[in-house]
Image (spheres, rainbow, N blue to C red):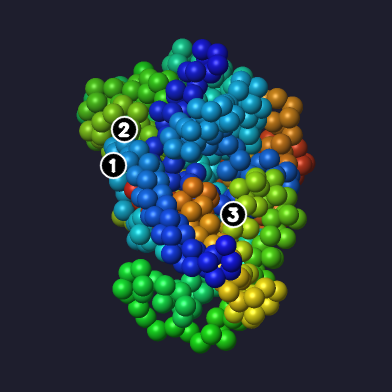
Amino acid sequence: MSASLNKVTQTLKEVIDAPIASYFESCVHCGLCAEACLFYTETGDPKYTPIHKVEPLRRVYEQEYTLLGRLMKMVGLSKPITDDELEQWQELVYDSCTMCGRCSLVCPVGNDIVYMIRKFREGMAVSGHVPDGIRSATRRTVEIGGPMGLKWPAVANVLKHAEENTGLTIPVDKEGADYLVLLSSMEIVNYPEYIEALAKVFHKAGISFTLASDAFEATNAGIQIGASDIARVIVSRIVDAAERLKVKYVLSPECGHAYMAIRWEGPNLIGRPYGFKVVHVLELLDQLRQEGLLKMKDTFKDPLILHDPCQIVRRGGVLQAPDALIRQVAENYIPIADQQKWNWCCGGGGGASAIHTEEAEALRARAFGVKKRQIEAAGVGTVVTFCANCRITMEEALDHYEMNTKLIGLTELLAEHLED
Amino acid sequence: MNELQLLTWARGPGLDIAVGIFVLGVLWRLIEIYTLGRKKDLAAPRRAAGASGLHTVFRRSLAPPGMLKRSPVSYIGGYTFHIGLAIIVFLGAPHILLISNLTGLSWPALPAQLIDLVAVVTMAAMLVMLFDRITKPAKRFLSTFEDWFTWTVTFLPVLTGWLAVQHLLLPYTTMLALHILSAEILLIVLPFTKLFHAFTLFGSRWYNGSANARKGVPV
């Protein structure tokens, strides 16, 4: 076994815990997880069956942790994992898994398959079998500050524009503010309206907030690639800034994986609980709505459906706020069959949208088939969502299918109809 | 060894060996799996109604929304043969007698004719599930030797038990001996194959349910 494979096996050995062991022992190969995975339902290719995507991890578990497996290994009857195999699995673990976690909701024996994928990615990251797109996004986040290579002067420029457009001040590095506002690069570059929307809402509600010039980026490519050491560096920037500025809350942007990273993985990465609370922007908005501080001047009339981003809703636990908020602003909101925690992924989560090989893009377009059917069945021309990454993924797919569907961010939609 | 000697062996030393391996195997495997432990989740938990490990242990016994329609054979066939096996093993008179001899515990049995019917339905459901495994792409793709093997060792005790009661194919004594031997093979194999899900599925559901409950998601 080569030195690098040794390291991979060691990493995989370390990530295997009692839940993973229990999950592997429980799998009866019923194949039901496939029916929950959009990459299987849209292609019919059985290699996309979720539990198959962690097969090399299962073999390491069997060979390292079970009596029979160890015996087999001793007499040379087991098949150790190989570099070629991991190379082959790269597509299964990254291109065709968005870590949407729908499989974890249907497995009849209760396996949390997305948890296993997340752990398996740790080994894949060590082995180097990682898509170039995610690798370079990760590198840019570590070296420059964000996955798109955005530096503070560019962000400051966007903030200046937002101040001009709204006539409001957007504080930076202000100590003692209630909220530290995080952004995702995608929002800064493609949807700066988000920042304006937020400024309006905060001023209206009389809540103090600030941005941090050294911690504005909320997304965490380290988590997507599966490298905990890198993920820790990225999360620490935010934790340090929040503690330095003595804020009570850190506000996660709409972006799904950013929320997952800062809200749920962060404390585990740095090895201690936070001294502040992490709040998703929709949680804050829904709280303001309940307090009567989010009044609308009018409503949005076009019929629309809501796309629930996986990492915020199914995997993040922001279950009730989106529905309540959309009902506040939309007159013709059409609930779809598979919604809230049962929603289907856009096809671009978990770093998949950063993979720009021809195969990965073609696969994403196919996987969008389920979303396309949802839009067509509802007969709407508008989809509202609350994740910049979902939005960009769906925009690409809508272009691909030459669909005339309009995409709107929920926060932005609320801000547009907010009482002046 | 004639059939009577075979039956005597199967009922005596054979059973002792099988039950011994089963009990020790189950204990060993449970220790092997659950002593691996897990890290404490340091993120501040969120609470939600209906979200906990225990909720998931029960909830996962039901088909999630839309899934019954997507895979009716898996669910209907799965329920039928699992419930059928449980009825035969725990409510068939001779089986209760066996358990009573081993543990001293006893409870009322179902009529033999009813158990007969359940056995036929169970075998039919298992054959349908086998056919489904052969024809359904995802299932077939996942299948290894172990899947065919465990199907066989689960099917044989039901088949031989039914044949013995019906006095079909072989003399009763021989068939009964084969029935007991096949059940012993099942006991020996169970802890070391995917059949062990009979024990671990509770742990798996609980882990999944409790991890997601911390995020406020009932799963």
Q: Chain of mark 3?
A: B
Circle 2/circle 3 CB separation < 8 Å? no
Q: Amino acid at mark 1?
A: Ala
Residue annotated with mark 3? B150
- Choose mark 1 or mark 3, whichever is in front: 3
Q: Position of residue A106 (x, y in %)?
A: 54, 55
Give me the residue at 68% from left, 40% from top. A47
Q: Chain of mark 2?
A: A
A313 on left or right of A208:
right
Q: Nearer the viewer, residue A398 or A381?
A: A398
Give SS at disc 2.
Answer: helix
Residue annotated with mark 2? A267
Q: Nearer the viewer, residue A42 or A68?
A: A68
Give me the residue at 57% from left, 86% from top. B113
Q: CA distance from mark 1 to mark 3?
A: 43 Å
Residue furthest front as drawn: B1
Q: CA distance from mark 2 to mark 3?
A: 43 Å
Residue A293 vertical placement versus A161 (above, below): below
Instruction: Say if labels 1 and 3 share a chain.
Output: yes
Please identify the quadrant where the N terminus of chain B is shown: bottom right
Q: Amino acid at mark 2?
A: Pro
A124 on left or right of B13:
right
Residue A323 vertical placement versus A89 (above, below): below
Residue annotated with mark 1? B44
Q: Position of residue B149 (x, y in %)?
A: 62, 52
Circle 1/circle 3 CB separation < 8 Å? no
Instruction: Say if labels 1 and 2 share a chain.
Output: no
